[in-house]
Image (spheres, rainbow, N blue to C red):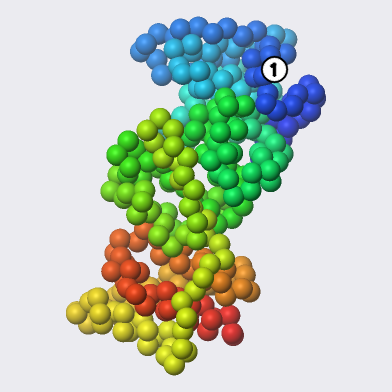
Amino acid sequence: MTPEEKHAVRFIKGNKLSPPIDVEAAARLVADVEFVAFPPYTSADGITLDPKSARPRILVNSEKPRTRQIFTLAHEIGHVVIPWHTGNIVSHLDDIDLPYTSYWLCEREANHFAAELLMPTEWVNLLLATHSNGIRKIYKELLSQAEVSPIAATYRLSAILPINYAWAVSDEFGMVAETGRTHNSTINLCSSDGSVRVDDAYRFASSRETFESGGKQYCWWYFGDQDMPEVAHTATWRDVLRKILEDVEHDPSERKRLSTRISAVSGFILGKREYNSVREEYARVLSRFEGRSELRAVVRHRDFKTYVRLRVEEFLSK
């Protein structure tokens, strides 16, 4: 947990709040709050004036959607509560592609504070335990109780769910527009430039759940313990890989290049060994081959999973 998230936890406990948090009432504990229509030429979401004074003033852009206003208000509370956030602050919730500065660091920290305030880790973990294997139910709870947007809920789940989850948000045409993975996951992310259909993403995952809202899909894939192909163990992984490359590529020099690339990807992830289970390491290696367009023909070959199983088994036997 980051320092700013710890300040959110202290704020909740110190004011005896419990989720779902009434964020407007919480804000009025530490500041005067106004909802104001900002000029149309500004992209600002909110403003905090004199955050370290006896009674700071928070302005929220009332022209923004309701869920964004709520997150903005939680964000501005962060500027008031986080000790090192000083001076008048004009807030933008989105990470804009600008040079790294202390301002954008403060904005990111206030976002972390807001996420922990609106969707406390302890509460979200309780929801996850209550609705195990039910991502859709978690979204419905967060959207209805915390009044956050689907993308805010997605970012929060990405920060809290355990290792080996990948997620993607589609555009209105069903193409991947944004994607990510949970903390410490090694899953190779697919492209998010609009060239990959959500239904074609993360083919090696053991399960998928989808939540739909506003014409978009919010999809989650889990790379966990999964079935492996039966193998006769009459050939080595090198034999299998050689046969695959002969099937998909006629140029010997290109076959050599592909072999080197595949071995590098497999070796890299196996070198970061995390499990003693063949099935779990098998799933982890497969996840590293997701979204690699230059290896598409290889990874879709009928014997590719056999190659991975044999490679993992040999590695773990050492």
Residue 286 position, x and y percent, is: 45, 67
How many numbered badges does the structure rendering display?
1
Residue 167 position, x and y percent, is: 47, 47
Residue at 67%, 19% in the rendered image: 22
Asked whether residue 272 appears in the rendered view, the answer is: no
Judged from the image, the secondary structure of the residue bearing numbered disc 1 is helix
Residue at 55%, 36% in the rendered image: 139
Residue at 59%, 32% in the rendered image: 142
Task: Give neighbour class at mark 1: few <14, some 14-19, many 20+ (Cα, 10 Å).
Answer: some
Residue under label 1, please give it: 26
Residue 26 lies, with reference to residue 223, above or below; the image says above
Q: For the view shown, which residue lies furthest in the bottom direction?
A: 234
Instruction: Pick the residue in front: 67 or 266.
Output: 67
- Horizontal side of 176 relative to 163 (left or right) equals left
Residue at 59%, 85% in the rendered image: 318
Q: Quadrant of residue 215?
A: top left
Residue 235 position, x and y percent, is: 42, 90
Quarter of the rendering occupied by the N terminus? top right
Residue 133 position, x and y percent, is: 59, 50
- Horizontal side of 77 relative to 270 (left or right) equals right
Question: In the image, what residue type sits under mark 1?
Answer: Ala
Q: Quadrant of residue 239?
A: bottom left
Asked whether residue 163 appears in the rendered view, the answer is: yes
Residue 48 lies, with reference to residue 275, above or below; the image says above
Residue 271 lies, with reference to residue 205, above or below; the image says below
